[in-house]
Image: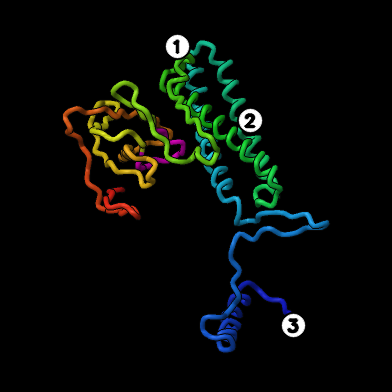
Amino acid sequence: MNIQFGTIRDFFDYIPKVESKLRKINGQEKAFPVLSGAFFPYSDFENDTWTGYFTTRNWLKRFTREIELLIRAADAFSASAFHQCRKPKTVCAEFSKSYKGNMGRLRNARRDIGMFQHHDEITGTCLPFVVSDDEERLTNAFRKAREALAFALSLLLAKGSVRSTTALKHSFDKESPRLLLLLNELKFQVENLKIVVANPVEHAREDVVSVCIAQGHEVVTDEERNIKQYQASEPIHPTHNGLSIVSFSVKLLPYEVRTFTILKSETGQNDAIESSVLFFYENSKSSMKYI
């Protein structure tokens, strides 16, 4: 074995030379050995078995990122709501008490997220009962962060009226936390469905908003009742038969909150646009158009 000191450049200059030698010895398809997989389990002292490593628990890693985005958005709009409600002549009945409660939700969500940042948990090298506790904590953090965001946006839309803060609450009762991030059907309230879209960052953005609703003829309008073009497609998963994904483009200024309405149309006339991408679902005779 030969060992020498070198820079990063020396390392990457040396790698192709070694690779070329290995290919001459082992053949073109065999250079450096490749190790792949989830890298678990492994046995520690006293035959304690640990599961997971940096590539495992990928669902929990994704879940934490979704929660962190919710907390970031709830923070931004809570600060904006606090500023708006402190202005003179603003209706803020019981605002202080409700605002403190909302900050409590965010504090609890941050604590639960922080628990998952432990060096064994974020890497996945913890015992199974700890993983179960993580799922429970992260599920609680997800719900608290979502409630806090809904509260802040409701305050902004209702100009500080605490009584209106339940307007944006939409319950997703799921049997498992792993189902929280899956496709959720939004129910119509009588003949319409209001969608609140918010931009929690300091720059303008244009995104596509997609919602899952029952199939039918729809009309999408903005705050000024202007009809928007949208795209309707079938969900890929076969368990969502009878549902439709409605997608439309939205432009948002920094920290802007906008409201859109999806109306049921009896005439069958809508502003749906045809997709340029065609998907075929395996084991299905019908094709589906999707963005």
Residue 8 left/right relative to 240: right
Q: Position of residue 152 (x, y in %)?
A: 49, 25
* Whether residue 11 is situated above or below residue 182 in the rendered picture: below
Q: Which quarter of the image is occupied by the N terminus?
A: bottom right
Q: In 3D space, how far apart are the residues under numbered discs 1 and 2 (Cα atoms)?
A: 32 Å
Front one among 15 and 10 = 15
Q: Where is mark 1, residue-wise?
A: 89
Q: Which mark is residue 108?
A: 2
Rendered image quadrant of residue 262: top left
Front one among 86 and 25 = 25
Mark 1 or mark 2, which has the lower sequence index?
Answer: 1
* Whether residue 120 is situated above or below residue 270 in the rendered picture: below
Q: Position of residue 150 (x, y in %)?
A: 48, 26
Mark 3 or mark 1, which has the lower sequence index?
Answer: 3
State the extent of the magenta-drawn residues as a range. Answer: 197-210
Q: Position of residue 71 (x, y in %)?
A: 55, 35
* Residue in view at x 54 percent, y 46 percent: 62
Residue 119 appears anywhere in the view: no
| Dot 1 crowding, Cα within 10 Å, few <14, some 14–19, many 20+ | few
| Dot 2 crowding, Cα within 10 Å, few <14, some 14–19, many 20+ | some
Q: Which mark is residue 4?
A: none
Q: Secondary structure at mark 3?
A: loop
* Residue in view at x 65 percent, y 54 percent: 52
* Whether residue 116 is situated above or below residue 6 in the rendered picture: above
| Magenta-span inclusion, residue 155 | no
Q: Where is mark 3, residue-wise?
A: 1
Front one among 43 and 21 = 43
Instruction: Check disc 1 and give the amino acid type.
Output: Lys
Residue 38 appears anywhere in the view: yes
Instruction: Check disc 2 and give the amino acid type.
Output: Asn
Q: Secondary structure at mark 2?
A: helix
